[in-house]
Image (cartoon, rainbow, N blue to C red):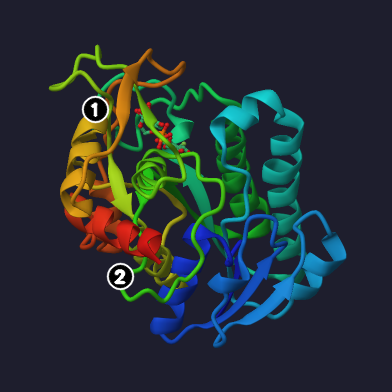
Amino acid sequence: MHILVIGGAGYIGSHVVKELLQQGVRVSVFDNMSTGQTDNLFPEADFIQGDILDVPALEKAIQGIDGVVHLAAKKAVGESMENPEKYAVNNITGTLNILNAMAKYGVKNFVFSSSAAVYGMPDYVPVDENHPTNPINFYGFTKLEIERFLPWYGQLKGINWIALRYFNAVGYDADGAVKGLEKNPQNLLPIVMETAVGIRSGMKIFGNDYDTTDGTCVRDYIHVSDLASAHWLALKYLAEGGHSQSLNLGTGKGISVLQMVQMAEKVIGHSINYEFTNRRAGDPGLLIASSETANVVLGWTPVHSDLENMIRTTWAMYQK
Ligand code: UFG
């Protein structure tokens, strides 16, 4: 099997490449290196520097491939509300370029990086795949739009697809095989780490008056290596004739912001300077996944996602 991993030099993409190489898959990485890092490239995988907006380059890379994993997207929720044009072009036009190139060259299997952001504010938890999709930010809208195209490309162009709806991705490869630390991180755990190592003098916890056990927001954190294994299982499932569908990837366990910070203090061995501030706009108090379907369909079970391990593997990177 020869797979093109688009966005394979990024944070999640590099973990996917590692997993596929371990499974004996031949991998080519296609990445424009806007947020991807040279440190994340594996010598065993071919590397093509290219952009999904450059159709000739994309078509050249896609010819003769057995399947595509697509993780090349803009993903900062706040930025997507300020600069929707950038998100429309990269996340929608760019992905349509990929699907069109696949259709043109008869590449049939597609694994797409989607997000829990397609759901918006949850009506109930755990959120399963039948939960209504109603994104409240433009980033989530771009992911959902692509999910709406996929059944049409399935029906009209014979493309088989799995959309993986990631919940909160955290952690790093336990073997240290992924070397690049995510640049300019926007998410909770890297912010905790940057505070711990002194890159930031302090951090804020957005709200302690939610209807949760300790008043801070609860999320479903999933180790990036567990996300990576789901991509391999999805490719295998499609190669064996599996049905196209969207699947949640989370653990089903909720962790609060305060629990995350306190466990980080324990792992790191010193206190982290934080203060409680107002709620952040658009934050649901509680967001937890049901990943029952991924378990049944793909046989996927997270094995790296206990809280301490997620923090330890991240801390190991920050200590370097
Ligand atoms: N938080 C803080 N302080 C910070 C940063 C975050 O208290 O400095 C809190 C947030 O309020 C939230 C939790 O930590 O309650 C997690 O926040 P993140 O920004 O790390 O993650 P989100 O849950 O907001 O969003 C993430 C991804 C999105 C994805 C979404 C789907 O960033 O891309 O999960 O659940 F769409």
At horizontal 19% and vertical 53% (from top left) the residue drawn is 267
Viewer-side residue, 13 vs 161: 13
Q: Nearer the viewer, mark 1 or mark 2?
A: 2
Could you tell me how many numbered marks the image carries? 2
> Which numbered tag is attached to residue 174?
2
Viewer-side residue, 141 vs 72: 72
What percent of the width, then of the height, locates residue 245? Answer: 44, 49
At horizontal 41% and vertical 64% (from top left) the residue drawn is 234
Amino acid tagged 2: Ala
Q: How far apart are the alpha carbons under marks 1 and 2?
A: 30 Å
Along the horizontal axis of the image, is 6 left or right of 235?
right
What percent of the width, then of the height, locates residue 105? Answer: 75, 71
User: Eyeballing the image, is 279 above or below 203?
Assistant: above
> Which numbered tag is attached to residue 93?
none
What percent of the width, then of the height, locates residue 40? Answer: 54, 71
> Which numbered tag is attached to residue 125?
1
